[in-house]
Amino acid sequence: GTVCASLAAGDANSHCGVGAAPGAGIASCVQSFSNCNPAASEDSLTHNYNVNDISSNSWGIDQCEYIEDGRRLSTDCPFECPSVSSDDCPCDACDGDDWASGQLSSTCEDAVVDYCTSYFNDDVTPCLELDHYFIRCGYGQISSYAHNQLLEGTTNGRGGLGTVYVFSAGNEYDLGIDVNYKNYAKTRFTMCVGAVHADLTHSDYSTSGAPVFITAPGGDGGNMAVARPLANGYTDDCADAGQGTSFSTPLVSGVVALVLEANPNLTWRDVQGLLAATARTDFNDENDETGQWTTNQAGVKHSYKYGFGLVDA
């Protein structure tokens, strides 16, 4: 968090380095990812959204991973079962189970699986919240609550102009992971940021996929240490950011801050359009067959690895 904040908005004080938007303000949302709570992550998306113009997120939840969240489900049975009798509704079979924790008995679990696989459209929200029982891998879909938080932020944030959400693409390219499997990174509300090396070739860690929106420098392999606050004593003075899309993301967020400084009346979609239209595409790795540019019917270039190109400001 500390290093990411400095990359986005580090002060121009002639000490260490300077952020992309040194005049921007910084707000923090402290979370413990050793015991990740998706509810806290989702609530942070609209925290003070009329003051915080940009939400820069150098984190994500692993694809196909379920993290328990007791905030979304109440202690009461969440199913309405409009099309079946009480005998076929999970509520009776789950009487006494703790819905809030999401830890259900085997009998209750079987009832949920039977109901949701047959009547999913009747109770979409609770079936989605409990889909880890009947879908081995949800491929990173966000919850309905997270969707509504992003919708709220882009609709009413920043005085109705919309909060600008920026998310990192991830660092699993060598594992064959696709950004399409990433929850927040693939929604239309967010800009997904990949990374390039100093020579403008695709960073060998940067997760690729159609949702990649834009790229920025993410660091090279000279130092693989994870960035930590200076208080931990890993350096004599200035922090070392290491490498990853976690560090390309705040650079894009800083550029967004510069854009909004120049024109604070832009909507969140205006910002996305401007970054896409001005991104650099004048670089290419001829040896990289999967990173080539394609041009759509509107004449806009896009790459599976670089998105609309390298952010340019």
Image (cartoon, helix red, strand yellow):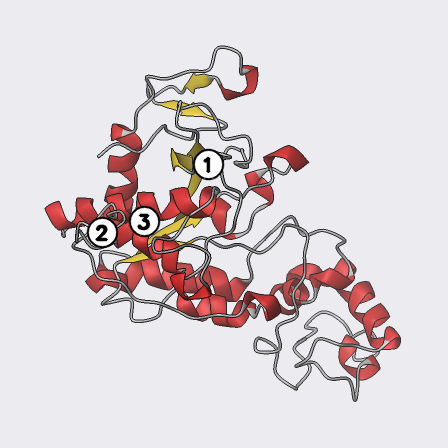
Q: Residue furthest front?
A: 236
Numbered circle sitting on residue 7:
3
Q: Residue furthest right?
A: 107
Numbered circle sitting on residue 212:
1
Q: Amino acid at mark 3?
A: Leu
Residue matched to label 2: 15
Quadrant of the rendered structure where residue 102 is? bottom right
Q: Amino acid at mark 1?
A: Val
Q: Amino acid at mark 2?
A: His
Q: Nearer the viewer, mark 3 or mark 1?
A: 3
Q: Quadrant of the C terminus?
A: top left
Whether pointer 1 and pointer 2 mark residues with C-beta atoms closer than 8 Å, the reply is no
**CA gap, disc 3 to disc 1?**
20 Å
Q: Is residue 24 above or below residue 90?
A: above
Residue 189 in sight here: no
Question: Quick one: label 3 or label 1, which is nearer the N terminus?
Answer: 3
